[in-house]
Amino acid sequence: MTQVSVIGCGRWGTFLGWYVANYCQADTVLMYGIPNDKTYEQLKNERKNEYLSLSDNMLLTTDLAQTLENDFIIISINCQNLRGLAKQINEYNVEGKTFLLAMKGLEEPSAEILADVFIEEIKQKIHVATLGGPGHVEDYMRKVPSAAVIDSYEPETQDRVIKFMQSNLIRFYYGTDIIGNQVGAALKNVIGLAAGILDGLGWYGLKGALMTRAPIEVGRLIAFKGGNPKSVYGLAHLGDYEATLFSRNSHNRMYGEMFAKGEKYMKSAEGVATLKAVKAIADRENIDMPICQALYKVIYENADIKSTIRGLFDRSLKQEF
């Protein structure tokens, strides 16, 4: 994997390109962006964004065919656009290539995990791995180390990607449940919205309750999807709470905080679309997810925030476990 491509020039995609170019064994990293997209245009014109400067071995292109010539391709885009991108990719010969999906979300409205969405649309033999876990670009650029988890339906693919990506900045663990890790990674963004709302209300004391009860209901969705509910306590979900429920660098937490204050947050918060997918599947399959249901009422149905949260305390009494 000496030549790597990255599809997506946002905060996380650009960092992963920079990381592979500087910490891994990539000779060159080809960054693909959409023409006239403001993030791509800034990188093209200034060779930097608000987080980092591109290294000399990072190249830019708007040519998807050229991007797909490399054998290892990292994808970091809005997860709701993944199916459309996969259909485009399938028009090219990508037989045998390895793709690392670096987004966290569920497709809306299907509630499918992203690995399955991608594999469905690529009608060729490819290798797919997923990336989850904590870590903010701002911290990494200060050389603060962290850990992450890589999973795959194929152990050989997982092993190859981890050994390539491993460095003293990020320690990668072998995931053992791609379903649980994908659902957990997606839902931590949703729980981040709830944490932000509590911050916006000044109800900080409730975040402890949120942190303990949310994994239990997320575990129910993981179990329904065929994963191991215990995966919710790994890096992809609970392990990402500090970076999502508390950090000012979290887009989802900040979205929730500003929402509670009646203000708009202009950056992408993947949890907002994922929440719709969660609500749909929870309703359809009768999965008990009271936190997510309450959050949906607040964000999509204009329910009163304080009374909706207080309503969670009016539910029938039950044992903790």
Image (cartoon, rainbow, N blue to C red):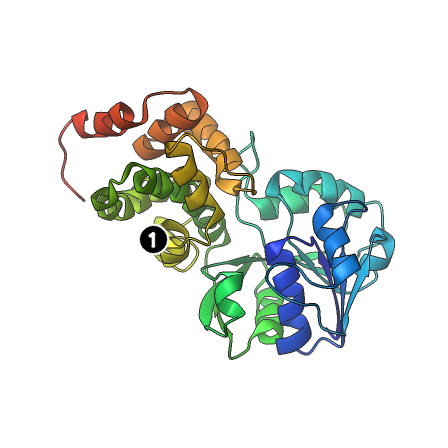
| Observer-nearest of 52 and 93 | 52
Secondary structure of the residue carrying numbered label 1:
helix
Where does the N terminus fall, quadrant-wise? bottom right
Q: Name the residue tied to disc 1.
A: 230
Q: Is residue 70 left or right of residue 247?
A: right
Residue 193 placed where, x, y %?
A: 41, 40
Name the residue at 63% across, 42% down.
Answer: 117
Q: Is residue 157 left or right of residue 135?
A: right
Is residue 96 among the parts visible in the rendering? Answer: no
| Observer-nearest of 151 and 191 | 191
Task: Classify 26 as above or below 150.
Answer: below
Residue 223 placed where, x, y %?
A: 38, 43
Task: Classify 170 as above or below 184.
Answer: below
Residue 172 placed where, x, y %?
A: 50, 70
Name the residue at 38% across, 33% down.
Answer: 261
Q: Quadrant of residue 46?
A: bottom right
